Amino acid sequence: MSALTIRLPNSVHESIKLLARKDGISVNQFIASAAAEKMASFQTLDYLRREAALGKREDFESFLKLVPDAPAQTGDELPSK
């Protein structure tokens, strides 16, 4: 495990302390979790971009042709304007 020194505005540090206490975890755990969540969001975006680059329009269109031409089920309708 690594140690990291960061500088935070006092207001941010106080908010983190309150939120960590409310969640029943340490400030270290709170910051580690927040960093992991941010990292996961970047990794997810990168993954989706790589997958999208592999997609082919004709595959998408052939998949859409499999969808039956039927009215939307109750609750799935588009909202009226």
Image (cartoon, rainbow, N blue to C red):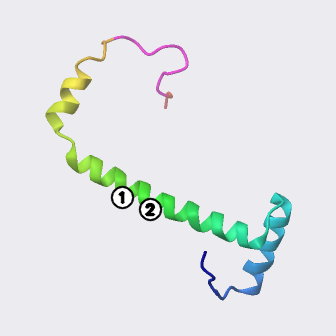
When the figure is inspected, residue 25 is found, relative to residue 58, above or below; the finding is below
Q: Residue furthest front?
A: 1
Q: In this rendering, would 4 be left or right of 13?
A: left
Above or below, 56 against 39 in this view is above
Q: Which residues are magenta?
A: 70-78
Q: Residues within 10 Å of mark 2 (few under 14, many from 20)?
A: few
Left or right of 36? Residue 21 is right
Q: Quadrant of residue 17?
A: bottom right
Residue marked by disc 2: 42
> Is the C-beta separation of discs 2 and 1 under 8 Å?
yes
Amino acid type at circle 1 is Asp
Q: Tell me the residue at 35%/53% (across/down).
A: 47
Three-letter amino acid code of the residue under disc 2: Phe
**Image point (35%, 50%), residue name:** 48
Q: Quarter-wise, where is residue 6 in the image?
A: bottom right
Q: Which mark is residue 46?
A: 1
Number of residues whose C-alpha sits closer than 10 Å to that of mark 1, classed few (under 14), some (14–19) or many (20 or more): few
